[in-house]
Amino acid sequence: MRIWEQGIVATYSLPGYKELILEHYAAFQRPGTEIVVHGVRDDASAAAAQIAGKAVNYAYLHRFHENQIIENVRRAEREGFDVVIIGALQDLGLQIARSVVDIPVIGYGEVSMLTAVMLGSRFSFICINPDMDPIIRYMIRENSLESRAAPNTFMDCGYADLHDAVNGKPQKFLDAFIAASRDAMRTHGVDVLLPGQTIIAEILWREGVRELDGAVVLDPRLPLLRMAEMRHDMRRAGFGISRRGFFWNRPPQELEQGVRDFYATPERFDHG
């Protein structure tokens, strides 16, 4: 079984992060499973580091990430991968990607929430960047889980502290995570704590944080991996996804090519 993990910019702009993801998966990986991790582009650059965590502030710029992720999902299918995991909290491009490939595509945010509702009564995403709050709330609404979701909780630390934690200095990060989590439990009755920003999950796993004051601290990597395996097995048994309705129906190849050709032809826009 071959799994393509699709990250965004930080996957390769933050030194050591990609390796930590693979080390984490290796703790649960079954023999014969291959996992390959990609960012939105396969090359690291100074520009990538500059835009990491910033494009999320703008819906228009966010769409560039989504479009590239969708194209990468299609590439994964062409190259013979069995499943794609979108390893980004906000599940960028997840719904549309499912409509254009036949291999299973699963998302970090969706799997985290669906697992959370089996482990407790109320969850909260514990995050770094407050600018992500509208996107996360939108994702929760799209999954019809408002009744099980407490407000998102934001830690008193930043991306520099994540960098330090990845590189062996985790204490400020851990202190901020514990303080934010206890506030969510005390204020909103949270009993399942979900790592926002996937890198938070990697640090918590490496530091051995599995629970806090009786609340579950979810490790999303294990359910992601098992969900990928289950969806692969279901597809092999003949169970795919819905192909009815606007969000699920796969467009005919000739129609898609016609639309692509239309928008790739500059003179189409010359005459109003």
Image (tube, helix red, strand yellow):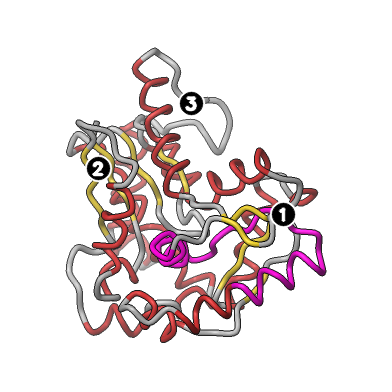
> Tag 2's secondary structure?
helix
Q: Residue at x 54, y 64 (%)?
A: 196
Highlighted range, magenta: 178-207
Q: Determine which residue is flagged by label 2.
A: 76
Closer to the chain start, of discs 3 and 1, is 1
Amino acid type, residue under disc 3 in the picture: Ile
Magenta: main secondary structure: helix
> Looking at the image, which residue sits at the far top?
237
Q: Quadrant of residue 114?
A: top right
State how far apart marks 3 and 1 are (Cα): 32 Å
Discs 2, 3 touching: Cβ within 8 Å: no
> Tag 3's secondary structure?
loop
Task: Report the quarter where the C terminus lies.
Answer: bottom left
Q: Residue at x 29, y 78 (%)?
A: 48
Crowd class of label 1 (few under 14; some 14 to 19; many from 20; radius 10 Å): many
Q: Determine which residue is flagged by label 3.
A: 241
Q: Determine which residue is flagged by label 1.
A: 191
Amino acid type, residue under disc 2 in the picture: Ala
Percent coordinates x, y for residue 164 in the rendering: 37, 83
Crowd class of label 2 (few under 14; some 14 to 19; many from 20; radius 10 Å): many
User: Is residue 196 magenta-colored?
Assistant: yes
Image height of 264 relative to 184, above or below? above
Q: Residue at x 62, y 62 (%)?
A: 125
Percent coordinates x, y for residue 143 in the rendering: 65, 45
Percent coordinates x, y for residue 63 in the rendering: 45, 64
User: Is residue 191 magenta-colored?
Assistant: yes
Q: Residue at x 39, y 35 (%)?
A: 228
